[in-house]
Amino acid sequence: MTKSNSYVYFALTGEDFEPQEITRNLGVEPSEFWRKGEKGNYNPLLKYSCWKISTVKGKEYSEIDKLVNEIVELLFDKIDEINELKEKLKLNSVLEIVIDIDVNPDKSTPAFRHNLKTIEFLYKTKTETDVDIYRFNSLENSTGKSAAFTDDEKTFQQLDWSILQNGWVSLYLRSQILKDDLKWFKNENYNIVKFECKSWTDETEMHKQLKQELHFPDYYGENFDALNDCLSYLEIEKKGQIIVFNHIDKIDIKLAYVLLDVFANNSRRHMLFGEKLIVLAQVDNPDFRIDSVGGSPVCWNKKEWLESNRK
């Protein structure tokens, strides 16, 4: 990421409620809302209801309190209504502050403070404040990082090029071929994270391991929408990031598809900024097939491309 997307939102969440009731009572149109049981972008069924009002992403970088004040000014005269709704519908409220910090040493860092009006609003509505901090580097715009590869003969012989020219995910059958390719990535200074999918007893365990190994924040929601959000902010270190899913065919095919689709979409997003996120999926079935993810087919690695090489 090479620009700031800082923003602030106020959210009311609960076990199950009708978001339109909040809209009617507050007279404020939400930026986003959903009800428990509805289908999310990646989740078959959302596990809670939410009503959210947000500032525009990237509107302000330095003075984050301006974003906070924008939300508070909108809701301050509705404190009584908010409290009535919280009590009636058994809701929780949070003021979420998402800050992108530019690590470019020539740039200033953002700052914020709560004024007395904000403190009063938070106190009277019993609203918690949560701060999420991410990093980006505006210097990357001028260093040529936007190009992931160079146009030369050497590039066309590289393993990362051979994978990414065809899609975002490469399939493997034989563990030795995967091991050899991982050795190449390691020598090229890629960061590698491995997952043993057959150890995932259920989707909850899968998200638990993803959170732990990819160092997601404590608030990670353990669902595919949350995974998509966290991957979009994933810090791609070294030359690139390799994600290995061993025995991915041992989990439900629908779960595997959504998982790979989320990673593939974010691989494409990171490529726009010259960052390489590559997924290697190992299977035990030589006839394994799965639909296209991230808008691209899931292809076998070049050594097992032909079906005859997997027999």
Image: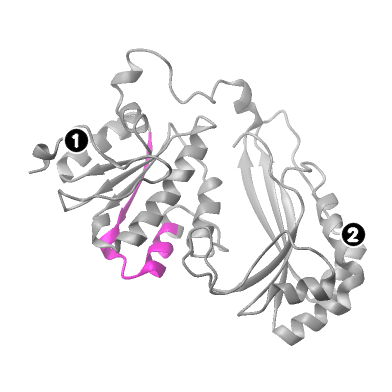
Farthest residue toward the top?
152
Q: Position of residue 103 (x, y in %)?
A: 65, 36
Farthest residue toward the bottom?
88
**Marked residue nearer the N-terminal end (2 or 1):** 2
Neighbor class of circle 2 (other Cα within 10 Å; few <14, some 14-19, many 20+) is: few
Q: Secondary structure at mark 2?
A: loop
Instruction: Say left or right for 277 vs 232.
Output: left
**Circle on res. 305:** 1
Q: Secondary structure at mark 1?
A: loop
Q: Are marks 2 and 1 in contact (CB under 8 Å)?
A: no
Residue at image location 54% in from the left, 32% down from the top: 273
Instruction: Say left or right for 64 vs 262.
Output: right
Q: Position of residue 308 (x, y in %)?
A: 9, 38
Residue 5 vs 188, above or below: the answer is below
Q: Is residue 228 magenta?
A: no
Q: Which residue is mark 2?
A: 115
Residue bounds of the magenta highlight: 190-210
Residue at image location 46% in from the left, 26% down from the top: 148
Q: Amino acid at mark 1?
A: Trp
Q: Amino acid at mark 2?
A: Asn
The residue mark sitting in front, 2 or 1, is 1
Residue 4 in which image quadrant:
top right
Q: Position of residue 293 (x, y in %)?
A: 39, 46
